[in-house]
Structures are given as C-alpha cells and as structure tokens.
Image: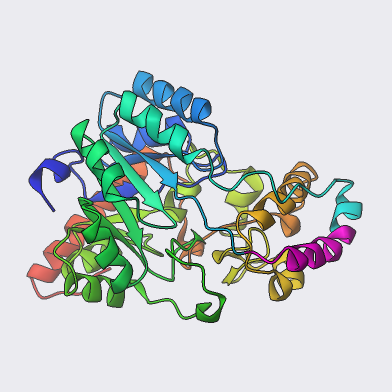
C-alpha cells in the first residue's frame, strides 16, 4: 500500500463501516486514537445526518478517518415478487403490531447529495460498497485530497475498481458479516462466494492495487495471515460490533456469543440482498422465500426489525455477524486495537522464528 495511505493509520487495522447505527462517531474515534482507521457508515442516513456525524467525529479525534457510501442500485426487482413477500410477512406485522414499510422509499440512498457534501467538506478516506463509482467521482475526490477505497468480492470486480482509479481494493471474503459488496446482485450466484485467503491471492495476481482484506477476521493471527497472503491491512467488523463504543443493540451484541445462535448464513430475508447474519427464527422462516429486491425488501422489513428490537426479541432482528462471531471480545474499542496489534506482532515473531500462528 502506498506510504501516503498507510501513514494515516499506524496499525494495519481498519474498523469496518457498519450501517444501521453501529459505526457511531465514538467507535470510529476510539479506533483512530488507538492507531487504527475508524470509519463512519453513511448508509441509510441522510446527507445532513452523515455531515453531523462527521462533525462529531472531528470533535473527538484529530486523526484521519473514513466514511463509507452505498452505491445506487439498478431497478430490476419484480414488483409481484415483492408483493408476495409482503403478504408472507403479514403475520410478522401482526405479531409485532407494526406496519410493513414502503418498499418504494428510495433507491439511491442520497448518493449524489452525500458526494457533494464530501467534496465540499473533504474527509481523509471514502469507501464504496455495492459497486464501483465512476472515474469522474474518484477523480473529484482525489482533487480534494481524499483516498478512495472500493469493495470487491471477485477478481473481475477488482479489475473494475482498478479501472476507476481507486487507491485500494477492499477484498471481501464470503466469511464477512453483513451485506456482501457484490457489484451486481445475481441470485444464481448466491452461496458461491470466495473465501478470504483465496480471494486476496487471486486479487493480488489480478490487479496492481493495495488490498485491504475483510471477512471473518477476529484475531491478530488472522491479520498476520492475510498480510502474509498479500494484503496491506485487515478490515474487521464483527470484532468491533461487540465493543462498548459500538452503537449496536445490546441484544445484537449478546447474540454474538450466545450459544443459542450457533452459526451464520447468507440470507436475503431482511434486505433482499445477500447478507450474513446469525441464524434466527426470522431468517429460517423467510430466508428461502425472500426475493432479490434491494433496497425494496430492506424498506419493507425495517419496521419489523425495529419492532422486534423494541420488544427485546432477537429472533426477529437482523443479527449481522461474520463467521468468527463467537470469538467476539467485550473490550473497549481502543483496547481491542491494542490487543489485536499485540497478537499481530506475536504472530509475526512466531512466523519469522518458524513457530505457528495463534
């Protein structure tokens, strides 16, 4: 990775931007202050809401940070399929005494307005999920001094990232919690994602871009492994979800290590796009029937998820989590960065001395 980018964060540790209220300013600030790269998630927020969080974060730390944007999605959903799924969810609405949301509540997540804010009020790093921004967008951000990162889940997507002129690619393995950042949502490819170590190796041989590895990373030894495979840094989401500064619902944090939730699964049940979460009742009952329709299904189920959280029912919530969720540690975010950095150093020492990685 270019020295200009790595100079922004002393430890090769990036806190993943987790939308839905998890990646709050105090979490990003704690990570930045400890030497990692903290991120705010602009997804599902208004442009004004994003700007307010940026101002809050700047009041908490003077260190560099990032902001993540969702790419607008093409219109391809089948309205009839959405109606059928809404009919299936009628029982959930009755159970939680909530109305289903309007599936036509907006498609672009305020993309252009948010870009305008970020051009007028530059931040050190901007990353993109669900696709690749145009070369014009990347160039405009470069002109105001912003580094650009883009998620890719395949070597072909990494090529698109390179063509757009981005500074680095975030290689997201299938182990990752939350939404897969696939550039095109193709139902026929569901479940065929590439594991992180293989993806890092493939992308390294495909493009001449620095790689940030993301997906199921919970320990410093795993960071050492992806660095050895060719990555320049590691991005961790679930590991930071359980921290004190995380804005995640307490039920969500507890579920990560609750033996009641034994595994994760990729599902369209909550949003209409593949996302990895803990397997609960809602996912089991509705996942097999959810159509490919993002963000329509996200809008449709939003009131149900909020009502389940209000009722204290984790079985109706979207419990996003990576495959290593049970390894989550309830530590302050800054301390977690320090622990991970220590584990990484120990792993590197073990590698150089011929020992094993822990």
Q: Position of residue 137 (x, y in %)?
A: 30, 43
Point 10% across, 49% down: residue = 2
Relative to 27, residue 299 above or below: below
Residue range corresponding to the magenta coloring = 77-91
Residue 121: in sight, yes or no? Answer: no
In the rendered view, how is the structure colored? rainbow
Percent from the top left, x then y, of residue 128?
37, 49
| 230 to 194, vertically: above or below | above
Q: Is residue 67 magenta?
A: no
Q: Quadrant of the C terminus?
A: bottom left
Give the residue at x 66% y 48%.
251
Count of numbered marks: 0
The x and y percentages for residue 181 are 44, 61
Q: Quadrant of residue 76?
A: bottom right
- Front one among 141 and 76: 76
Dividing the picture into quarters, in which one does residue 173 lie?
Answer: bottom left
Q: Main secondary structure of the magenta part?
A: helix
Out of 96 and 224, give the one closest to the viewer: 96
Q: Is residue 110 left or right of residue 267?
A: left
User: Taking 62 as reference, is 193 left or right?
Assistant: right
Give the x, y percent position of residue 340: 29, 52
224 lies left or right of 180: left
Residue 287 shows in the view:
yes
Magenta span contains residue 90: yes
> Compared with residue 274, is residue 100 higher up or lower down, i.e. above or below?
above
Q: Residue at x 68, y 57 (%)?
A: 297
């Amino acid at each position: 990775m270019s020295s200009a980018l790595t100079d922004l964060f002393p430890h090769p540790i990036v806190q993943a931007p987790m939308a839905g209220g998890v990646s709050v300013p105090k979490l990003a600030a704690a990570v930045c202050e400890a030497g990692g790269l903290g991120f705010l998630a602009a997804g599902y927020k208004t442009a004004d809401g994003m700007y307010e969080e940026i101002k809050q974060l700047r009041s908490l730390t003077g260190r560099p940070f990032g902001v993540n944007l969702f790419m607008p999605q093409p219109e391809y959903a089948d309205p009839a399929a959405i109606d059928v799924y809404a009919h299936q969810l009628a029982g959930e609405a009755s159970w939680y005494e909530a109305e289903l949301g309007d599936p036509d509540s907006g498609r672009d997540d305020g993309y252009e307005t948010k870009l305008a804010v970020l051009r007028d009020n530059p931040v050190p790093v901007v990353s993109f999920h669900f696709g690749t921004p145009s070369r014009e967008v990347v160039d405009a951000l470069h002109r105001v001094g912003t580094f650009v990162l883009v998620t890719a889940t395949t070597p072909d997507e990494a090529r698109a990232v390179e063509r757009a002129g981005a500074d680095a690619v975030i290689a997201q393995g299938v182990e990752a919690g939350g939404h897969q950042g696939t550039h095109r949502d193709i139902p026929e490819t569901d479940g065929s994602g590439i594991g992180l170590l293989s993806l890092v190796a493939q992308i390294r041989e495909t493009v001449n871009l620095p790689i940030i590895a993301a997906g199921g990373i919970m320990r410093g030894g795993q960071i050492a492994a992806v660095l050895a495979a060719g990555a320049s840094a590691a991005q961790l989401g679930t590991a930071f979800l359980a921290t004190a500064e995380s804005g995640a619902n307490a039920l969500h944090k507890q579920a990560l290590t609750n033996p009641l939730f034994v595994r994760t699964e990729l599902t369209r049940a909550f949003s209409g796009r593949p996302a990895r979460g803990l397997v609960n009742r809602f996912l089991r009952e509705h996942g097999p029937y959810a159509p490919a329709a993002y963000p329509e299904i996200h809008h449709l189920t939003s009131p149900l998820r909020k009502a389940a959280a209000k009722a204290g029912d984790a079985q109706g919530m979207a419990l996003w989590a990576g495959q290593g969720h049970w390894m989550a540690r309830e530590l302050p975010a800054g301390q977690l960065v320090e622990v991970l950095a220590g584990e990484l150093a120990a792993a590197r020492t073990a590698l150089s001395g011929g020992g094993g990685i822990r």
